[in-house]
Amino acid sequence: MNVTVSVFSIGIALMVPILWAALGEVVVEQSGVINIGIEGVMLIGAFCSALGYRYLHGLTWGLLLGIGGGIVCGLVLSLLYVRLGTDQIVTGILFNVLALGFTSTLYTKYLGGGVVKTYGAVKIPLLGDIKYLGEILFQQNVLVYASFLAAPVVFYLVNNTWYGLYARAASEHPRAAETAGLNVWRLRYPAVIVGCTLSAVGGATLVLTTSGGFVNGLTEGRGFIALAVVVLARWNPFAVIAGCVLFGVAQALQFQIQNLGPLSHVPSDFVLMFPYVITIVAVVAARGSRYPAAIGIPYRPSSATAA
Amino acid sequence: MSAVNLAFRSIAVRHETTLRSLAGTIVAVALTLGVIAAVLAGLGANPWSAARGLVSGALGNRFNIGQTVMIASLLILTGLAAAIPFSARLWNIGAEGQMYFGAFVVAGLGLTLPSDMSRWLLCSILVLASLVAGAVWALVPGVLKATINANEVIVSLMMTFIALEVADYGITALWPQPAAPQTRYLPVNATFPSIWTGTLVTAGAPLALAAVIVAWVVMRRSGLGFEIRAIGLNSRAAQMNGMRVGRVTIVAFAMGGAFAGLAGAINVLGMNNALVSGFSGNFGYLGIAVALLARLDPTWIIPSAVLFAILRVGSNGLQVQTGLSPDVGEIVVATFVILLLVFKVIRLRYAEAQSV
Amino acid sequence: MLVGAIAAAAATSSRSATYQVAVLFPGTSNDGSWGQAWSQGSTAAAKKYGVKVTLVGNLNTPDQYLAQASAFGSKGYNLVIIANGGVGQADLQAAQHFSKTKFIQAPFEFATPAAQKARNEPANLGHIDAEQQQGAFLAGALAGLITKTNKVASVNGYAFPALTRQPEAFSLGARCVNAKVTFQQKYINSWDDTALAKAAAQAFISNGADVLFSATDQAAQGMFQAAEAAPHPTYVIPSYFDSHSQAPKVVLTSVLYNLQGVAEDLIKLGMQNKIGDHFYKQYTYKNIGVGKLAPFYNLASAVSPAAKAGLAKITQGVLSGKIKIPDETTGSPTIGTPNSAAKINVKSLGCTPK
């Protein structure tokens, strides 16, 4: 397999957890909430899926439990962000600390080591045989394919449904939306819950495919990278895919560095920095991206009849 | 409405709600204790012996108190690193990385500068270097925020990951030590002297206290501090009143970074005497919790940091007593602060967007 | 039965002079690697010698090691084993303060008694070393003998000399038996990032490597998966613990540093009061089997009789001293820095590669 194909193929596999998390964050942010706690949600999704795999025996159970973990996170966070109206950025940061503490403590007690027999690669007939492109795109595992399918679904949800329209209105001018008869809170709850579920699937993907097992602090900043990708892609799910691919390839590139001639003398520490530097460059390149006007501000309905 | 007006109103409002927030605090504390007791019982540990283990581990004897003091010093500084930018609604969550970079620079200088210099001089140079290093590292998110409104949460966090790699480069390539992922030990003259016999408390502790004084003077008694807080309340109004938001942003980040860099110096010069890979137990992030609990007020950061230090050091004693992982302390910390947020004890009052 | 249990409890509680040992380590007691090896050895020693052993895992930062070591010191424990490097001064500080307890720092520190005195270490602090490069060399020889693509590779944790000697020795071993073999390596700066290890392994596999060495900890799990999904038969040789059951199709063997035996030996010596001032002990292949390779189990068919014979010959050569393996302090050049072994002519070590 030649070097370029290998880099892209590994890159796609590496980026999928971030893609799920980013898609989840698109759903959340388009309703006017910013979830900095996405890292914690991924971690909890990863942990739950590892638990499910170990104790209920099987990848499917792992995935289901990971989804369950995401739903629980979504319920807790929607309670905090929407109903109780705590400051979203601060709450999100603390949620990450809490998630790390919880998973670390429970990891020692209930998980320990243990390899996960991950989802194998599934070759798609015909498409998988295309030279180069087939190897890169169509010989991946099912969660990769599922993420490719999730993107258009999210796109449709955000842009082509009534729900998406109302939610985005509430994210720009919640007061006006309320005057027009929308219940801002009822629009935001499902966004946070669904968004967290998708992000948790990203964590589950880490355990069930990429890493094949849970270790403390598994996510290593991927949630925050997803936040950056979302801004750079201007909340367009397809652009999100492109951003994630860029990031995944950047990560995969470091393992082929020795084959790239002069670059092979770069110390490995600097190569490992590369994905994070790319993210900062992406943030700079995203200048001009405008967050929705009322994002991050807890909304207090003017009437007492809010849900 | 002018920013000055707004600031005065918020002060008045705060006095009114003091009783309410006191009640809220009590409820939050009670609830947190309840949650923790439930978690501990669920994990099979006796909450009372856990509490005993925690307290004796952190405060049971002079040696342990010394350990608590040093960790509190670190948390005071990372707390300040968060509190000052947060007061301007600038989310500096990169204190962890700023601390690592400060530690990196200090370790490098300490190992390369001539060690026969006077200890006072050498240590002063190193302290200054750490302040500059931390400030420089924080300037990246600061300048990007001030110029192109880049999301400082993401940038400051990415800088943290980069700083970890820079530190590892120092450990593995520049100043390696044969048997472990840490640098060579610094010469004696490049380390802080011990100031409390029978403990490990070094000159780092009074440095942290000095930092609090500096922060208090800046935040509560200087024009800069006033501007920072005004911008935090309503940056548009502040700008219209002639405050240079961009410049204050950069200065706030630089100050925060400087404090975090000093934390790195205290660790390298006053605790480990070397740069150890992964030396930080999330001290940077805990600093955020410290700052929030202290409501971003520099004076309250001291007791807040002490509380978190007790939790951190004591959780090792808790472990010895109950067999639970030391990470339990982190759960306590985060639950506590979240509950305080929920009960509006901690309230970061910012003007809502004027939406139509 | 209840009476028996109570009687036993009464008996042990009256023996308040039970020797108490604490073992502090990163990782967990069931991580299939470093942590598990130390835990197994310590627990076995507890049973064998009737001592009380307390295991504490998941310790990562110097302040945690300091707090734990001092907690056990203040409880009057007799021996505290710190099975981790990178603890700053925690070992020194704890030993200074709790002079009645013996402390052993056990990440293979090269602190001979002279070096310890130079660092002003207290007498109750000791160190050990283990000749890791011998086992890694043998693993390399095995790799060189069975590789069909003549490409081998290594995924490593951090680049400090005690670690670096392992992959460097591995490369020497491979070149010792196979004149055509090439070697690549990658440092991932982590002990447990399985995703990174997996990606590194995949890159090596796509470049043609078919035997991989792991000088990391739990991250090796990622390498197992990469090998399982490889297009050509690929094997992984991890370190510290017999990991065959984790991935029976690809874990050909493991380099066992017999940490279990080291733990047992230390506890035994402690109990017999044989841990003296400025204690220093070297564990080698000869005295405790450090560096033995685990059995091949079901993969024995992958090793041809010729390869087995070749490995036996090399092992004999290493044991008898005919083949001299440099380490991070001896040899020219020493193998403490990455890629230093590439400069060594294996014939000068006593090898005859084919």
Image: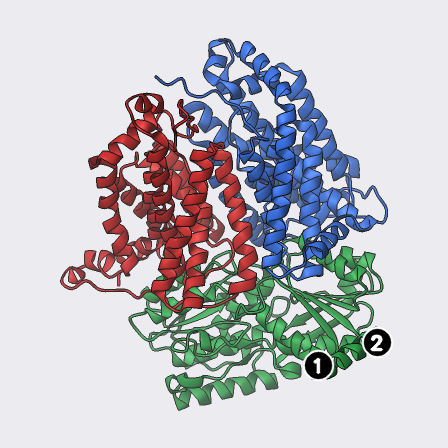
Q: Nearer the viewer, residue C125 or A20?
A: A20
Q: Nearer the viewer, residue C105 or C349?
A: C105
Q: Which residue is mark 2?
A: C14
Q: Chain of mark 2?
A: C
Q: Which residue is mark 1?
A: C2
**Foreground disc of the pair 2, 1:** 1
> Which colour denotes chain B?
blue
Q: In the displayed structure, does residue A172 sit left or right of residue B243?
A: left
Instruction: Name which residue type carries label 1.
Output: Leu
Colour option used:
by chain
For the residues labelled 2 and 1, the Cα–Cα distance comes to 18 Å
Residue B10 makes an appearance in the image: yes
Q: Which chain is red?
A: A
Quadrant of the rendered image containing residue B86: top right
Q: Which chain is green?
A: C
In the picture, the quarter occupied by the C terminus of chain A is top left
